[in-house]
Image: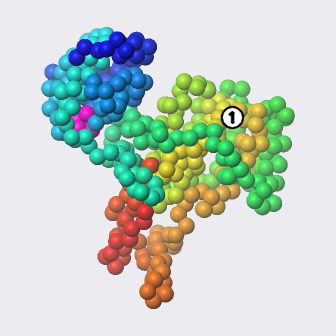
Amino acid sequence: MALSQQAKDVISELPLNDTLDFSRSRLCENVDDPRREDIASLLGALVISPTTFKLLSPDGSGNVAAKLFFVQQHVRGDSVELDHFRTLIHYVVSKSSDIDIWEAVFDIIHDLGALTPPPSSTAPTFQGTPVRSSSSRLSDSETRDIVEREFFFEIRDCTFRNVGGFCDKFFNTESWYKGQKEMLEAIITEHDGNRWKSFPSVPAEQPVWDWLRSLGDRALSDLFFQTPVSVASGTFEYKHVLIVGEQKSSHDTGRFKADFLQLTRLVRGIFIDQPTRRFVHAFTLSASIMELWVFDRSGAYSSGAFNIHDKPDTFARALVGYATMDDNAMGLDAFIEREGTHHYVTLDDATEGNKTRIRLLRPIVRQKAIVCRGTTCYETQDSNVAKFS
């Protein structure tokens, strides 16, 4: 399909560059008989390129990103013949021009235009949190590349940075008890007015975590680096994680998306293993640039990025807050009682006014998406089902 001059201008302004390198290497392994997952991965790479959001679809209804995403879902669902993609694969593998590649994309969208669009990833709920199910169907064995592309679609419209009042909401010193305020004062003494005294000159991973641990040893009564409950295998699981942090030795604003999606993947693991978790605190620390995050079922919210040397009070408040939060402030569920390895929930009988205590067994339904209702169903000891949403 011939492209309009406007489309060619967009393609020239936003070249693909190395966007397709990973997909190209996968496709080169099976050019004559490409795997369905590799084609889906290629479409995913195209979908998240900035170009797709600027290009109008062939029929003028929306952008190419939305149309191509629908096609990708059909490929994943095994409901479209792979012959439709041979020209595109040929152009990608042979490193043809961007114009050739996008013309092939337009041909695919035009040829498959009669496909029934899959259900919207945002289902109507009328009240409450919308259900965005793009990542809920991904298995843990999916490659990081595939998973993070799905995350992008799930959370890109639900991410809010520089939220006003963020620190006052989650790290409000006015409500802190005396011990917390003393910890805050003790940590602040480690800042000389210009920078943190012992912060590593080369902020590699191990020196930075050693520095954080030293702050904890001196000021946080060893609370910050609590040892999780050990498991038989000697490894730790997401169900043990309270707060997640991602540390990098350098700060690069151009790397924000990749770093954020990596953090999102970790948070998703927590929500999967802790299905009744209400929200998760997280942070990134790239060299001396920190950003505080809270993820809940409606999306991700942040304090905005700040330099810990320039804003020592914000950094210290976060450190003390993370170290001393109770279960409620941490986002853990407040309705399931835990006695050893057994879990219980107490229900009110609206008819007779009595309370019924039910033992929960294994979760039989849980969501793998972050942005969703978080619906979880447990089998109960009396062979019934307890549903939380």
* Most distant residue in the front direction: 60
Which residue lies at the image location 16% right of the left edge and 29% below the top edge? 82
Span highlighted in magenta in the image: 71-76
Give 12 or 260, whichever is nearer the viewer: 12
Is 181 on the left-hand or right-hand side of 203?
Answer: right
Vertical placement of 285 versus 124: above or below?
above
Does the magenta-highlighted stretch encompass residue 72?
Answer: yes
Give 5 or 15, whichever is nearer the viewer: 5
Give 140 or 232, whichever is nearer the viewer: 140
Mark 1 lies on residue: 306
At which x and y percent is residue 197? 80, 34
Give 128 or 253, whichever is nearer the viewer: 128
Which residue lies at the image location 68% right of the left edge and 31% below the top edge? 288
Q: Amino acid at mark 1?
A: Phe
Which quadrant does the C terminus fall into?
bottom left
The scheme the figure's colours follow is rainbow
At which x and y percent is residue 345? 47, 74
What predominant SS class does the magenta segment belong to?
helix
Is 229 on the left-hand or right-hand side of 98?
Answer: right
How crowded is the residue under tag 1: few (<14 C-alpha within 10 Å), some, or many (20+)?
some
Which residue lies at the image location 56% right of the left edge and 41% below the top edge? 160
Residue 374 appears in the picture as rendered? no
At which x and y percent is residue 212? 69, 41
The picture quadrant where one finds residue 50 is top left
Q: Label 1, secondary structure: give it.
A: strand
Is 32 on the left-hand or right-hand side of 309?
Answer: left
Does the magenta-highlighted stretch encompass residue 352?
Answer: no
Which residue lies at the image location 49% right of the left edge and 87% below the top edge? 353
